C-alpha cells in the first residue's frame, strides 16, 4: 500500500511539472506572437477612430498560405489594429470596417478568438479584409515618404521586410503592375501609374466642379457634396443635374438611395444650406475628373492656395488638403 501511495505521489508530481512546463511553453509562444505583431505606426481614421498598423511575417488569417518572395524573404502580411466603438456589435463593426461587411461579420470571431468585443481593446485585422479607405490611410501612415506624383503614386521602399509580391498585393489590382526586382532595395522609389493603382485605396487626388465640393464624411469615405439652395428639389436639382443616369426608374432609385444615404425621411423637406452627399461613382463625367499633377500637394502650393471656407459643412475632414481654382474643388493627398 505504501509503495502504491509513493508511486502515485511521484506520478502526480511528474504530471504537475509537465503541465507547468507545457503552460510555460504556451505562454512563451503567445508572448512571442504578441511581440511579432507589434504595430509600427498609429493614425486617426475619420478624425475619430485611433488605429495602428504594421507587418507580420506570417499571415494572420487562418488558411492563408505564407509565400516566399523571389528575394528569399517571407512575404508576410500587413495588419491594422482598431477598437470597436462603444456598444458596437459584430455586425455593425463589420459593416463599418470590413469589405463586403454584411457577409463577413462572422469572420470577426476568428480575429477575436471568440471573445466578446471590447471597445477598450485593439482588435488585429488582416489588411486584405478591410475596406479600401482604411487600407489607404494605413499605407499613408506606414510609408511616410510616399506621395502623389505626376502620373501616379510614388512609393519609396522604407522597410527591410518589403517585397515586390507584398507591394503588388497591397497597391495594385492583380497582375497589372510589376515592381522591378533588380532595383528593389531600401530607398528605391517606384511610381505606380494611376490606372494600375487600386482606386478603392483613395490615394488618387480627385476634383469636382462648382457647385459641387468633395469631402470625406464621418465614415472616412469621399463623397461629392451639394448645398441645397432655395427652390431646389432632390430629383431635379441633384439627381437629374449631377447623376448620369437617364432612365426614369433608375433616377427614382437614385433619389431613394440618396434619401437613405443622407438620413432624410422626405425629399420634399429640404432646407436651404443643407448639404446632400452623393457617391463619386454616380457623378457625371463633366463634373468629376482626375486632378492634374500641377495640383499635387507641395509646400509651395500649400503656402499660396486659398482654402475654401468650410464653416457650414457638417462633416469631418480627414487629412486631405482642399482648395478651389477656376471653379474646381480639389481633394488631394500628399
Image (tube, grey):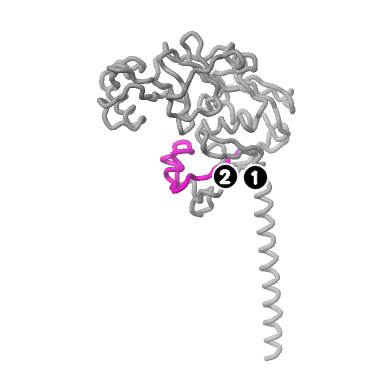
**Quarter location, residue 176:** top right
Residue that mark 2 sits on: 124
Q: Characterize the local packing of mark 2: few (<14), some (14-19) or many (20 or more) Cα atoms within 10 angstroms.
A: many
Query: Magenta stretch: residue 103 in it?
Result: yes
Q: How far apart are marks 2 and 1 (CA)?
A: 9 Å
Which disc number belongs to residue 257?
A: none
Q: Is residue 3 above or below residue 246?
A: below
Callout 1: SS: loop
Q: Position of residue 252 (x, y in %)?
A: 27, 23
Q: Is residue 320 left or right of residue 227?
A: right
Which disc number belongs to residue 37?
A: 1
Quadrant for the N terminus in the image: bottom right
Q: Characterize the local packing of mark 1: few (<14), some (14-19) or many (20 or more) Cα atoms within 10 angstroms.
A: many
Mark 2 touching mark 1, by CB under 8 A? yes
Q: Position of residue 84 (x, y in %)?
A: 50, 45
Q: In this view, does 102 lie above or below 290?
A: below
Q: Is residue 146 left or right of residue 250?
A: right
**Quarter location, residue 92:** top left
Q: Which residue is drawn at 59% across and 35% down?
A: 43
Q: Position of residue 30 (x, y in %)?
A: 65, 54
Viewer-proximal residue among 321 and 145: 321
Who comes first in sequence, dot 2 or dot 1?
A: 1
* Residue at the farthest top position: 326
Q: Is residue 174 left or right of residue 72?
A: left
Viewer-proximal residue among 140 and 79: 140
Callout 2: SS: strand
Q: Is residue 310 above or below residue 129?
A: above
Q: What stretch is highlighted in magenta?
A: 77-106
**Quarter location, residue 80:** top right
Query: Magenta stretch: residue 159 in it?
Result: no
Quadrant for the C terminus in the image: top right
Q: Position of residue 62 (x, y in %)?
A: 56, 46
Amino acid at each position: 500500500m505504501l509503495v502504491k501511495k509513493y508511486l502515485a505521489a511521484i506520478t502526480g508530481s511528474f504530471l504537475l511539472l509537465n503541465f507547468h512546463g507545457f503552460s510555460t511553453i504556451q505562454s512563451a509562444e503567445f508572448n512571442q506572437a504578441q511581440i511579432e505583431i507589434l504595430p509600427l505606426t498609429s493614425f486617426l481614421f475619420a478624425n475619430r477612430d485611433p488605429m495602428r498598423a504594421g507587418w507580420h511575417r506570417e499571415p494572420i488569417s487562418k488558411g492563408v498560405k505564407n509565400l516566399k518572395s523571389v528575394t528569399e524573404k517571407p512575404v508576410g502580411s500587413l495588419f491594422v489594429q482598431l477598437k470597436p466603438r462603444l456598444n458596437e456589435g459584430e455586425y455593425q463593426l463589420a459593416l463599418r470596417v470590413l469589405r463586403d461587411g454584411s457577409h463577413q461579420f462572422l469572420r470577426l470571431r476568428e480575429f477575436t478568438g471568440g471573445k466578446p468585443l471590447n471597445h477598450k481593446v485593439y482588435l488585429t485585422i488582416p489588411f486584405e479584409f478591410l475596406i479600401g479607405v482604411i487600407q489607404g490611410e494605413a499605407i499613408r501612415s506606414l510609408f511616410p515618404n510616399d506621395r502623389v506624383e505626376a502620373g501616379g503614386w510614388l512609393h519609396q521602399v522604407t522597410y527591410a521586410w518589403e517585397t515586390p509580391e507584398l507591394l503588388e498585393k497591397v497597391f495594385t489590382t492583380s497582375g497589372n503592375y510589376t515592381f522591378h526586382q533588380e532595383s528593389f532595395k531600401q530607398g528605391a522609389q517606384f511610381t505606380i501609374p494611376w490606372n494600375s493603382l487600386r482606386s478603392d485605396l483613395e490615394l488618387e487626388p480627385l476634383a469636382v466642379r462648382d457647385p459641387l465640393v468633395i469631402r470625406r464624411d464621418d465614415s472616412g469615405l469621399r463623397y461629392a457634396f451639394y448645398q441645397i439652395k432655395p427652390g431646389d428639389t432632390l430629383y431635379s436639382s441633384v439627381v437629374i443635374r449631377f447623376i448620369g443616369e437617364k432612365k426614369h426608374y433608375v433616377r427614382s432609385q437614385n433619389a431613394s438611395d440618396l434619401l437613405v444615404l443622407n438620413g432624410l425621411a422626405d425629399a420634399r423637406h429640404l432646407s436651404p444650406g443643407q448639404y446632400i452627399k452623393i457617391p463619386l461613382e454616380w457623378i457625371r463625367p463633366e463634373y468629376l475628373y482626375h486632378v492634374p499633377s500641377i495640383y499635387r500637394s507641395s509646400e509651395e502650393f500649400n503656402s499660396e492656395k486659398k482654402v475654401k471656407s468650410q464653416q457650414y459643412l457638417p462633416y469631418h475632414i480627414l487629412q486631405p488638403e482642399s482648395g478651389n481654382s477656376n471653379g474646381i474643388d480639389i481633394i488631394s493627398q500628399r
